[in-house]
Image: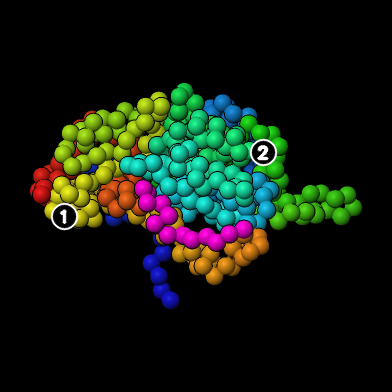
Amino acid sequence: MTVERARYGADAAAGLAGTLPQPFPRTIGPNATSYLHEVVESGLTCNMIGRFEDAFAEEMGVEHCIATPGCTPALAVLACALDFNPGDEIIVSSVTDYGTVQGIIRENYIPVFADTDAGTVVSSAETIAPCITDRTRAILVVHMTGTICDMDPIVELAEKHGLIVYEDACQAVFGEYNGRFAGSLSNAGAFSFDSEKTMGSDIGGCVVTADGDLAERMRFIGHSRGGQMLEGFGRQHVVPGFAHRMPQCTAAVSLAQLEIIRPNVEQRDRMIRLLAEKLEEIPGITPLPIPDYMNVYSCWMAGFSVDPDAFTCTPDAFAQQVAEGGIPGAGTGRYYLMPPALPFLHEKAEKKLYPYSMPPASRDYSYNGDTCPNAQRFLESFVRWSSFCERYQPEHCELAAHVVKEVADRNRA
């Protein structure tokens, strides 16, 4: 069977047309060539990975950074280090990407998807609380688009129930919540350095944590494949592990990107706030809300909601006209709603295949959009573009708002 495979990075952006800036080709830190040369000249003996980990941890203000080949492996390393039992539940934000839950599923934990707050792409303590059961072991929050979840109430809720909290901060690198960085607001946080992300390298990711035991377990299982050295024998694999190690050349590019990331994020913050102000002036259009607790919005994806009653066209047609008007890659994003985006999970739950068999599962599960009504309703009329980037200047925000306004006026009911 021939299928159209999903594309990522520059490959996914190829062919996008429009009058607004695009992320590719990426701006690369000036020291990248020097660091790559050092890797080659050393005969692969320099510790570029360790240098990146130390630099990223220092910049984040955390004790430990564990570098990985990408964001999906970063979250997989975290999942395998949690040491829960098959059938244990992890509550996950419902609006995200498959990479968030891949590790959970591979460890035979059961994802339970929390709804979002109405009119947003993020979960909250209020939407998470009804999902907690006696099998819940952790909460995985997702700072979707760079919008940081309101973390203090979530952490307080978790402490009340004895749960671990960790963050998918892949779209929120160096975003700030009440003066603290996303990814440092809980037990651990995962980041993406995939080429299309804010701190885009060739690929890459990492996990940060203040928990030394968790960090060592991630390195042991996630980097060393769960292998220990036994005298007189050699490697003995005491747990099934992974070799999710960041390559040296990726570390070199990531280190160079780290050196230019803060001005990048600051520019994104200024431009997304300006763009939101201008979109808010258009009747029938509601920009993605920016919470007051976010000091710095490390925005990866711009977006707005279309009031279906205000226009004669569908949100999909509106998005298409916006793309044709010059905003590259504009479109709807229903696929971010995880329950219907994972039909294999629904099938396993419906057929009660392991781990949905009882035991280890303690109850029946169902995965469909109706279980997350706020998120499903929001994504039906949400238009986004992931080509938003640090190259935006005030005139680009003006132009983007002008494109949206023209489409709105042309289709107004």
Please name which of the two marks, 2 or 1, marks the residue nearer to the observer: 1
Q: Give the range drawn in magenta.
A: 362-375
Please provide percent x and percent y for residue 219: 68, 43
Residue 296: which quarter of the image?
Answer: top left
Residue 311 in the image: above or below residue 267: below
Which residue occupies 59% across, 51% down? 89
Which residue occupies 51% across, 35% down? 154
Which residue occupies 58% across, 59% down? 363
Residue 287 in the image: above or below residue 223: above
> How far apart are the alpha carbons under marks 2 and 1?
51 Å
Taking the image as drawn, is residue 154 in sight?
yes
Label 2: which residue? 215
The crowd level at tag 1 (other Cα within 10 Å; few <14, some 14-19, many 20+) is some
Image position of 373 (left or right of 126): left
Query: Element at badge 1?
Result: loop
Label 1: which residue? 313
Please provide percent x and percent y for residue 160: 59, 35
Please provide percent x and percent y for residue 262: 43, 28
Residue 109 in the image: above or below residue 81: below
Query: Element at badge 2?
Result: helix
- How was this image coloured? rainbow
